[in-house]
Amino acid sequence: MADIQELRRIASQVRRDIVRQTHFASSGHPGGSLGCADFFTALYFHIMEHDPSFNMDGKGEDVFVLSNGHISPVFYSVLAHSGYFPTEELATFRKIGSRLQGHPATHEGLPGVRVATGSLGQGLSVALGIALSKKMEGDDRMVYCLCGDGELQEGQIWEAAMFAPHNKVDNLILTVDWNGVQIDGPNEEVLSLGDLPKKWEAFGWDVMHMNGNDMEDVVNTLEDAKGHTGRGKPVVILMKTGMGYPVDFMMGTHKWHGVAPNAEQLETALAQLEETLGDYPYPAK
């Protein structure tokens, strides 16, 4: 289990991986990936009990579902550094024949990916199914799910939000990346989300808040959330992050939701991100 300082070091390398993956693929979603790097790092290196040898059914270990699958670069980086596959494979991101598709997929057999995601609104329902199956089988491990805030505009999210407390799914922790922007602009301009804390409370969830770009707060809140499980209610963490954090020219705008940095922008970004675990090699572009 990594301590706070080590988690910060890992997260810095993860962010370098994100901008390098998207640059060399000339596509992908760096903004949300960068903003969620602390969350993913804390989850896989401190919070979850998981096994990189990987069994698809996830029995006896914690399971994670990435509902907003477009932020796959951060997911792939953390899986690689956790030992699920070699970090060198990150260089194949979005290449033809690669196991590292633009959205996580299962038919390529990538270790660490249990469900194909990216069709927004569906991941929470899948996570609920996994959580219910664990309860039915007497498996006491947890299920974690991440959704984007723009994703909450999908109706299926709120069907799942009704289903979970009605069925007392209390082995599930949902985190919402509440960065305030989506592909077309600010949430408030595209479709206001209203009062999210009160909405989730009204649906019967145990609501918590977290600064997703403060590693200490991420770890403490996730640990606290685990203590709120098993009480007959699902838990949701509303996680405030900055799109593109901490790369200065990517922050505070929706424009980096799905745009890859060019060569000059890549160098500018890398200059702001410490290399801590070593950059994996890339073939000549």
Image (cartoon, rainbow, N blue to C red):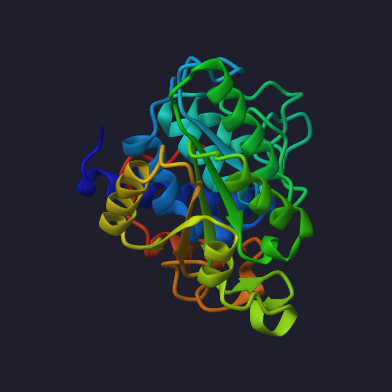
Image quadrant where residue 166 sits: top right
Task: Residue 146: tell me if it is visible.
Answer: yes
Residue 285 can be seen, yes or no: no
Identify which residue, 46 or 261, lies in the foreground: 46
Residue at left offset 70%, top offset 54%: 157
Give above or below for 223 relative to 268. Answer: above
Q: Is residue 221 above or below residue 57?
A: below
The answer to whether residue 149 is left or right of residue 47 is: right
Picture quadrant of residue 151: bottom right
Q: Position of residue 254 (x, y in %)?
A: 63, 74
- Tell me how many marks there are: 0
Foreground residue among 58 and 172: 172
The residue at 49%/33% (across/down) is 79
Relative depth, front residue between 4 and 99: 4
- Image point (32%, 43%), residue name: 227
Could you tell me residue 70's position as x and y percent? 67, 51
Farthest residue in the bottom direction? 189
Image vertical order of residue 248 relative to residue 239, above or below:
below
Residue located at (55% from left, 16% from top): 137
Rendering coords of residue 19 (x, y %): 53, 55
Image quarter where the N terminus lies is top left
Q: Is 253 left, or right, of 83 in this rendering?
A: right
Please tell me whether residue 146 is drawn above or below residue 201 in the rendered image. above
